[in-house]
Amino acid sequence: MSKELIESGQTALGIEFGSTNIKAVLTDYKGNVLAKGSHRWENSLIDGIWTYGMDEVTEGIQDCYKKMVSDIKEKYGVAKVTKYGAIGISAMMHGIIALDKDGKLLSPFQTWRNSNTQAAADKLTELFDFNIPLRWTISHLYQFVLDDEPFVKDIDFCTTLDSYANWVMTGEKNTGVGDASGIFPIDSSTNDYDQGMMDKFDALIADKGYPWKTKDILPKVLVAGEKAGTLTEEGAKWLDPSGDLEAGIPIAPSEGDAGTGMVATNAVGPRTGNVSAGTSTFAMLVMEKPLSKVYREIDMVTTPTGLPVAMSHANNGTTHINAWVNIFKEFCEKAGVDVDENRIFETLFFESLNGDKDCGGVLSYGYYSGEGVTHLNEGRPVLAYMPDSVFSLANFMRSHIYTAFGAVKIGMDILIKEEHAAIDRITGHGGLFIQKGVAQKYLAAALDAPVTCMDTAGEGGPWGMAILAAFLVNGNGQKLEDYLDKEIFASLTGSTIEPDKAEVEGYEKFIDNYKKAITVEKAAIESMTW
């Protein structure tokens, strides 16, 4: 049956550019995973800017796609993969890709990880009376203006990574509303950029005399279910240099990893939320009403259909955990012990369950980059503990997993304790939840709320993007939330963990220590300057 679906093109392909992996997931129209591919990559810090080369973007997506096709051929004996029902592209949100009228890159691609936009973000937050985070595209654009970058006048298209990939594949300059909400504030009543704020920004930079208006250089905003374009001959060859892939495939609106995370966890309706935990970690809650005031710790974005979402976003997540796993792996190799990396992850995660509820006084700050929630513009990975702390392997590892939720919890506490936001369901997804029942248990303690993980939790964003692609061709006019309930999640299984009182109290003690000792992280940033 799966072979026939693949050969007839009754499938949906989702590809996501994550921070450390580019992943492809092929599904049928019910969300069942048929094949996968992955390409490992890493950002580079060049002249103080976190970036990826555009050649790395091309090479990465081609390698990822090739591996997925190999998976298809190996599993199903399909001789040639030529078509899909629909394709969707997603990527880590925010950052900036600035192109001229010939499609030439004017400045290195700046990722969400950069925090060189403090002046711009502060000014725009004041101007709009709306929180503008440092990583948003408009912050980067305005920082270019403040820095008097000579190329700003030549910008013809200013966009994000997923929107860029969509443009290469289709020739169309657009993006999904969820991704757009990390470019510029969205008016959910129109599902477009907020025109009043846009007018203020254009007036702010009017004296520069640029030959463009801001809306003209940003991608057009689309909602889930609309068509973002059709795969062109050039786009097909960019994705599949072998020449097997045919042009003409419908393309869904590209999305940021926040939007695909919402879809992957069925958290697109009011009072539902999710936590995506990977290289960055963020919690999102679909709101019933606006926030009572502006919080610099809370971003306002949207679902893929434009509903307002409050987000607590941490730039740092699993990178520090991965670094320590590599150390343990290296030790095993040096000791002549052949241990699979997945076994190391599994051993360390499950050992953490034997630790003290408050980590025994052990603290970890996995800050590889700045952290907006704790108001730090740079990062230094730090492991700290008191002379009388219980420094064991279990507490060591538990502290690393706890801290992956640390900054996110600070933001979520604002929503829960100050804004009294109602939560019906929180769902976790992403790489941190692969070891079942571990990070899920700690997140339930951090939020003092039940946390559900579906069996697809490890698939994350690319699976969510595949579902959005399926929705484009198989939605049949339904609302996205109804489509997810009836067509995708009705037959999926998962597990829910209720918060344990002792775990909640232990996490609260840990987070108090985390906040008290943040000066240690600040001191590390100030003194470690080599």
Image (cartoon, rainbow, N blue to C red):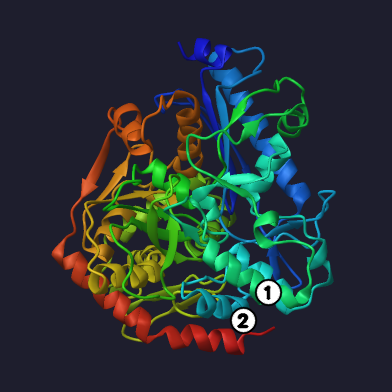
In the image, 277 versus 297, the foreground residue is 297
Q: Which residue is mark 2?
A: 119
Residue 201 image point, x, y percent: 62, 71
Mark 2: which amino acid?
Answer: Ala
Quarter location, residue 423: bottom left
Q: Taking 433 as reference, is 528 left or right?
A: right
Q: Residue at x 45, y 64 (%)?
A: 313
Q: Residue at x 41, y 24 (%)?
A: 476
Quarter location, residue 449: bottom left
Residue 516 image point, x, y percent: 36, 86
Mark 1: which amino acid?
Answer: Gln
In the rendered picture of this protein, how many numbered marks are placed on residues?
Answer: 2
Q: Is residue 348 above or below residue 526?
A: above
Mark 1 touches mark 2? (CB < 8 Å): yes
Q: Taking 166 as reference, is 260 left or right?
A: left
Residue 196 image point, x, y percent: 53, 66
Quarter location, residue 65: top right
In the image, 194 versus 334, the foreground residue is 194
Q: Name the secondary structure under disc 1.
A: helix
Residue 371 image point, x, y percent: 50, 73
Which of the two discs, 1 and 2, labels the residue nearer the N terminus?
Answer: 2
Tell me, yes or no, if residue 18 can be seen here: yes
Q: Which residue is mark 1?
A: 143
Label 1 crowd bin: few (<14), some (14–19), many (20+), radius 10 Å: some
